[in-house]
Image (cartoon, helix red, strand yellow):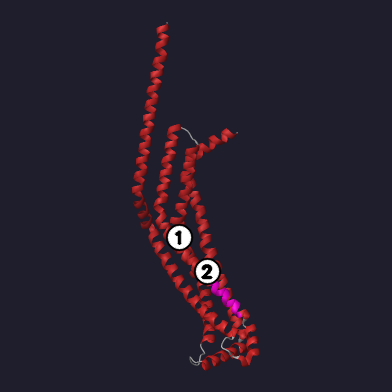
Amino acid sequence: MSTTDSTKPAGGWAARLRENLLSHLGRRLLGLAVAALALAGFHALGWLTATFDALGRGQLVAADRAYLTQSAEQAGDAFLTLSSLQGGLHLVQSGSAGISFIVDLQARVGDLLTPLVKMVDRAAELSLAGMAANDALGVLLQAAEVVAAPLLGAVLLLLALHALARLVTLQGNRLSRFSGESAELLLVVFLTLYLALPLAVWGASQLSQAFTAPLAAEAHGHFTTLNDHLNAGGRGGDLKGTVHGVIDRYETFSSKLPEKLHLAGEALKRHLVIFALDVVVFPLGLLWLLYLVARVIARHLLGPLHAVERAAEDEGVR
């Protein structure tokens, strides 16, 4: 009786030990398999990015860069025109050529030109801000090329960590939930930078060509006309020619100032619309919509991984 009782626990203990050893060995083997899959995934990153490029992303990025280059050239031409116009207006407004015998006329025309100077200054600031935004988009596109592989690699490592944490405990825990949610977040960042950003820039370029390109041409034409009227008249490089040139500018702007103010006002309004649409509404609006799509895709792909952990924690709270 006692012998039978002593052997049963031994046999049960041996079976449980063997089961535990096999279970731990199986978990280790599965963990090694997951790690091997992660390493293989790193080697497949180049193939994955090449696949995206073959599906059309490469052509999309090339079109984006061509658009940004063209936009930078147009913005640079507009800024140079506005800078020349600024210099001429400030010269006329200040009367720094030393014409002491028409001080009253100098003060009157200087005051009249103040609204025009302010409008040209605001347009130059908008052009400079547009150039900066254009350069920032170019830098982001370049950065997306650099960080794409590290982001996908981090996603694979976090997925491997999530699988190992689930294998160790055979159920959800904080580590598995953290790794799963981090993998989902990084996947959203990858989809946004590597796929959504080029698509948003391309969409903004199409909208810009359809809606704001005619406005930009009109605004540039208005400011070019003003610049030609202001800076076309010089009579030589000596002091006498400079004095006569300043007097001519006084006479021209005092006789047709209302017309030029209206022209500059129309051009400035177009610059404001172009800046708001091309820099804010078109690219950021499209990028936000595509970011929401990327979140939905990542949630459907990786959301089930940590659904168990969330359900367990909710039950624990209850």
Residue drawn at point x = 61 percent, y = 84 percent: 259
Does residue 222 appear in the picture of this structure? Answer: no
Specify whether residue 102 is in view: yes
Task: Examine the structure image and report whether residue 89 is included in the region drawn in magenta.
Answer: no
Quarter of the image where one finds residue 16: top left
Q: Secondary structure at mark 2?
A: helix
Name the mark on residue 104. none
Q: Residue sitting at 52 percent across and 57 percent down? A: 288
For the point 38% across and 55% down, which residue is it? 52
Q: CA distance from mark 1 to mark 2?
A: 16 Å
Relative to residue 164, is residue 259 drawn left or right? right
Query: Which one is in front, 290 or 141?
Result: 141
224, above or below 144, in the image:
below
Which percent across, then down, holds residue 30?
37, 35
Which residue carries the number 2 mark?
Answer: 129
Assign the N terminus to one quadrant of the image.
top left
Question: Quick check: 217 above or below 4?
Answer: below
Residue nearest the viewer, comparing 297 with 239: 239
* Mark 1 vs 2, N-terminal side: 2
Q: Is residue 30 above or below residue 39?
A: above
Which contiguous range is marked in magenta?
A: 116-126
Q: Amino acid at mark 2?
A: Ala
Which SS does the magenta portion mostly show?
Answer: helix
Q: Position of residue 292 (x, y in %)?
A: 52, 53
Q: Position of residue 175 (x, y in %)?
A: 48, 38
Q: Quadrant of the C terminus?
A: top right
Using the image as rendered, state which of residue 56 and residue 44 is in the foreground: 44
Label annotation for residue 140:
1
